[in-house]
Image: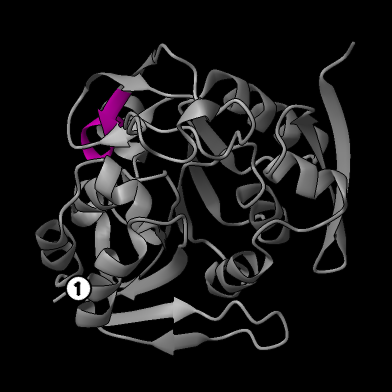
Amino acid sequence: MNPFVLANVIFNNTPFWFYTHIKDQIIGESLRQGIVFEEQELKYLNSVVKPGSNVLDAGANIGLMSIPLAKLEPSATFFCFEPDPLNYALLNLNIVINQVENIHTFNYALGNEQKFISFYKNNGNFGDHRISKPLNNDFDSGNFSTFSNQVLMVDIVDFLNKCLGEKAPKYFDVIKIDTQGADIEILNSCLPLIEAHTIVVMEYSPFHLLRNGTTKEDINRTLDYFPSIGIINRNVENLGIIHTNIEKIVNDFDTLSPTLHYYDITLKGKK
């Protein structure tokens, strides 16, 4: 039986097609039902990607964010990193069938150095693959394979300079990070590529961050780099940013880390 199913969704009055794996019961299933996954995040990103923008997508999955954004703004340039080989293959296939030509893809994890790392795959949620091992008492530990895979992690500044040379972007205008716990580590590695106008959209999931070894001190130190912090309003009828502060974000770490509750935060500028 063919495990790949073609899904169709409409965003901003534009149709998009995505090949999904039948076993992906979260992102893939949403797309197969015609639902735009994380629509509020996508709407916000669409509002900040401008003509000529350089955009980083860390944790690109099968292209559910970058493909619509790239097609709607063809003069922007997207740099998509996706470590899982299957998701990466579908990402490239979906780029072709949507006739998008302004996306560069890389089959690597991002981090603070170059080395091979363990990679744990969720058997039912292909958007929840992680570089951190689930804890034995986690409610979802049974969803993961017993053995990890090995993927190559790269430092983005060093990698882009070696890979693209003079064509490497000097900065990113927009950065989207959704990496199931490696988010703060990746954001730190991106700091040299952030300017005062740069907008970062990052999933904030204390449950995943804790399992990745991230501490409240790590979060506080990294977020202190940005003078403006907000939370994307998940109300579908009211797109906007709710302004917040580091203290609230850090306090949520204790409250949310035992559960799988998360939200998307926005960061702008640099001190």
| In-front residue for pair 66/255 | 255
Residue name at image x 77 percent, y 49 percent: 30
Is 96 drawn above or below residue 222 in the view shown?
Answer: above
The number of callouts visible is 1
Is 250 drawn above or below residue 235 in the view shown?
Answer: above
**Which range is magenta?**
153-160
Q: What is the residue that sits farthest to the front in this orientation?
A: 137
In this picture, residue 110 sits left or right of residue 6: left
Q: Is residue 208 visible?
A: yes
User: For the N terminus, which image quadrant?
Assistant: top right
In this picture, residue 270 sits left or right of residue 169: left
Instruction: Residue 216: give x, y in percent of width and height.
Output: 15, 61
Q: Amino acid at mark 1?
A: Lys
Residue name at image x 64 percent, y 31 percent: 124
Is 180 drawn above or below residue 237 in the view shown?
Answer: above
Mark 1 element type: loop
Q: Is residue 227 visible?
A: no
Q: Which quadrant of the figure has residue 63?
A: top right
Asked if the stretch drawn in magenta spans residue 159, the answer is yes
| In-front residue for pair 5/25 | 25
Instruction: Residue 181: give x, y in percent of width and height.
Output: 34, 45
> How crowded is the residue under tag 1: few (<14 C-alpha within 10 Å), some, or many (20+)?
some
In this picture, residue 45 sits left or right of residue 202: right
Residue occupied by mark 1: 270
User: For the C terminus, which image quadrant?
Assistant: bottom left
Is 53 drawn above or below residue 189 in the view shown?
Answer: below
Instruction: Residue 174: give x, y in percent of width and height.
Output: 43, 62
The prevailing secondary structure element of the residues shown in magenta is helix
Q: Which quadrant of the figure has residue 113?
A: top left
Instruction: Residue 21: give x, y in percent of width and height.
Output: 75, 27
